[in-house]
Image (spheres, rainbow, N blue to C red):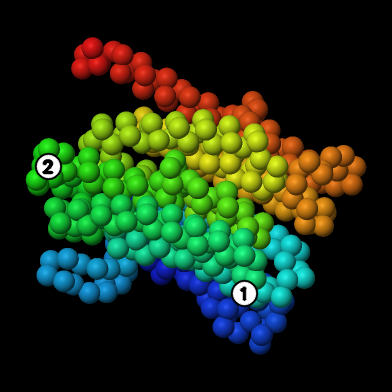
C-alpha cells in the first residue's frame, strides 16, 4: 500500500514563492534590495526542500496524492476546485522548477545589481515559480488552465521588463499574441472534454476517454478524441514554441538573461511537453493526433537547428537551440515515448539553463554586447564561464557520459522502435 502525502505540506510548496513575490512586489521599498532577494530566495528554497522531500516519498515509499484541497464552486454537476495530483511525473517537475528557479534567483543578485527595477524583478520571477508549480501540481483542467495563463502573463511582464526599450515592448506583445492563438485551441480542447466527459477532473476524464473515443464530432466526419487531442496540442504548440507558433521565443530574448534561463529554457516552454505527457491517456487513443505531433516536432527540431546556425546574437543562438530541443521532446511524445520525452525535458532544463546563465556572464563581461562576432579569446579572462559553457555545450550536443547523450539517445531509440513496430504492423501494409 502506498504512503499518503500531507496536503498542508503540498500546499506550502506553491505558497512559499507566492508569499515572497507579494512581499517583494508590494513592500519592495520598505524591505529594500536585500530584503527583496532574501525573502524570495527563502520562499523558493523552502519550495525546493519540500519538493525534494515529496520526490523522495514518491520514489522510495511509492507515496501518491490525488485529492481536492479547496472547492471553489459547483455548477450543476461540474465541480470547480483546487486540487493536487502528485505522482512521479509531478514530483520530478516540481524539483526541476524549484531548483532551476533557486539558482536563477541567486544568479540574479549579481546580474541585476545596478538595475532600478531590482525588487520588481525578484517579485516577478518568484510569482512565475508559484504559477508553474500550480500548473504542474494540478489534478483538474481548471487549475491547469489557471497555471497555464499565469505563466503566460508573468512571461509577458518579464519579456517587457525593460519597458522603455521599444524592442522589448514589441517582443512581449508578440509573445502574448502568439500564445493567445495556442491558448484558443487549448481552451477549445478543455471545453470539449467538459462537454462530453462532464468533468474537469483528470482521473474522471481519463476514465471516460474510451467512451469518447467511439464518438464523432457532430456535423463532421472527425473522431471526437482526435479533435480534442489536436486542440490540446495546439495549446502546447504555443507554449512550447513548436512550428509555426515558434516565432515568439527568439524575440523574447529582449528580456533580462536570468528569465531567459528560467522561462525560455527550463520551465515555461516545457509546460506544453508536460501537459501532453500528463494527457497521455487521451493521446494514446488517437493515432492521427500522435502522427500530427510527430510531424510538427520533427519540423521544429530540424529547421530551428538550421536557423540557429545563422544567428549572431549569443542569446538567440541558444534560443534556437532550445526550439530544436523542444522539437526532439515533441518527436518523443509523437511516438508515445512519454517517459523519454520527460527525461530529455529534465536533462535539457539543467544544461540549457547553465548555457543561458553563462551567456549572461559573457554579456556582462562584454559590457552588454551580445554579438558573437565581437567575442573570442575570452577563456583567459573568464575561465569559470568558459568551463561552465563547455560543460553545458558538451551535454547539449550529446557527448557520451554527459546527461544530454542519454536522453537524446533514448529519443532516437524510441523513434527507431516505433518505426520497426509500424513496419511489422499488418495495417501498415
Residue visible at 78% across and 41% down in the picture: 373
Q: Is 84 in front, or is 158? A: 158
In-image side of 140 versus 396 (left or right): left
As rendered, which of 83 and 180 lies closer to the eye?
A: 180
- Quadrant housing the C terminus: top left
Image coords of residue 271 (percent x, y): 44, 51
Read off the residue under disc 2: 220
Give the left or right position of residue 134, taking residue 218 as reference.
right
Name the residue located 58 percent from the left edge and 52 percent from the top edge: 251
**Which residue is disc 1 drawn over?**
120
In the rendered structure, the answer to whether residue 263 lies left or right of residue 32 reads: left
Seen from the viewer's position, the closer of residues 333 and 70 is 333
The image shows residue 238, relative to residue 302, as above or below, that is below
Q: Measuring 57% from the left and 48% from the top, which residue is drawn there?
A: 250
Res. 39 in view: no
Left or right: 255, with 22 as reference point: right
Q: Residue at x 68, y 73 (%)?
A: 118
The secondary structure type at the circle numbered 2 is loop
Task: Report whether residue 25 is seen.
Answer: yes
* Mark 1 crowdedness (10 Å alpha carbons): few <14, some 14-19, many ≥20: many
Amino acid at each position: 500500500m502506498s504512503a499518503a502525502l500531507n496536503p498542508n505540506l503540498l500546499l506550502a510548496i506553491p505558497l512559499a514563492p507566492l508569499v515572497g513575490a507579494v512581499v517583494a512586489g508590494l513592500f519592495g521599498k520598505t524591505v529594500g534590495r536585500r530584503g527583496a532577494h532574501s525573502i524570495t530566495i527563502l520562499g523558493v528554497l523552502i519550495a525546493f526542500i519540500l519538493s525534494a522531500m515529496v520526490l523522495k516519498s514518491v520514489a522510495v515509499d511509492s507515496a501518491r496524492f490525488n485529492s481536492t484541497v479547496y472547492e471553489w464552486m459547483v455548477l450543476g454537476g461540474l465541480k470547480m476546485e483546487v486540487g493536487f495530483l502528485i505522482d512521479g511525473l509531478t514530483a520530478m517537475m516540481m524539483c526541476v522548477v524549484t531548483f532551476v528557479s533557486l539558482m536563477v534567483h541567486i544568479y540574479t543578485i549579481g546580474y541585476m545589481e545596478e538595475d532600478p527595477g531590482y525588487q520588481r524583478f525578484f517579485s516577478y520571477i518568484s510569482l512565475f515559480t508559484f504559477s508553474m508549480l500550480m500548473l504542474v501540481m494540478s489534478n483538474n483542467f481548471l487549475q491547469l488552465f489557471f497555471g497555464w495563463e499565469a505563466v503566460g502573463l508573468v512571461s509577458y511582464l518579464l519579456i517587457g521588463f525593460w519597458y522603455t526599450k521599444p524592442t522589448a515592448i514589441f517582443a512581449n506583445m508578440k509573445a502574448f499574441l502568439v500564445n493567445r492563438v495556442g491558448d484558443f485551441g487549448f481552451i477549445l480542447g478543455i471545453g470539449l472534454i467538459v462537454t462530453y466527459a462532464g468533468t474537469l477532473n483528470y482521473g474522471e476524464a481519463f476514465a471516460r476517454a474510451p467512451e469518447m473515443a467511439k464518438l464523432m464530432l457532430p456535423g463532421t466526419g472527425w473522431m471526437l478524441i482526435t479533435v480534442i487531442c489536436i486542440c490540446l496540442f495546439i495549446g502546447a504548440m504555443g507554449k512550447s514554441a513548436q512550428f509555426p507558433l515558434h516565432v515568439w521565443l527568439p524575440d523574447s530574448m529582449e528580456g533580462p538573461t536570468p528569465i531567459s534561463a528560467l522561462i525560455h529554457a527550463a520551465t515555461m516552454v516545457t509546460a506544453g511537453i508536460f501537459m501532453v505527457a500528463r494527457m497521455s491517456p487521451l493521446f494514446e487513443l488517437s493515432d492521427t493526433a500522435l502522427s500530427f505531433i510527430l510531424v510538427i516536432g520533427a519540423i521544429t527540431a530540424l529547421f530551428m537547428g538550421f536557423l540557429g546556425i545563422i544567428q549572431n546574437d549569443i542569446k538567440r543562438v541558444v534560443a534556437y537551440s532550445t526550439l530544436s530541443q523542444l522539437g526532439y521532446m515533441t518527436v518523443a511524445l509523437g511516438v508515445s515515448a512519454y517517459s523519454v520525452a520527460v527525461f530529455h525535458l529534465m536533462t535539457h532544463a539543467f544544461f540549457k539553463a547553465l548555457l543561458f546563465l553563462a551567456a549572461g556572464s559573457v554579456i556582462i563581461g562584454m559590457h552588454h554586447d551580445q554579438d558573437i562576432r565581437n567575442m573570442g579569446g575570452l577563456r583567459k579572462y573568464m575561465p569559470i564561464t568558459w568551463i561552465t559553457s563547455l560543460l553545458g555545450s558538451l551535454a547539449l550536443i550529446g557527448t557520451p557520459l554527459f546527461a544530454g547523450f542519454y536522453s537524446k539517445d533514448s529519443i532516437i531509440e524510441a523513434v527507431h522502435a516505433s518505426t520497426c513496430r509500424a513496419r511489422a504492423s499488418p495495417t501498415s501494409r
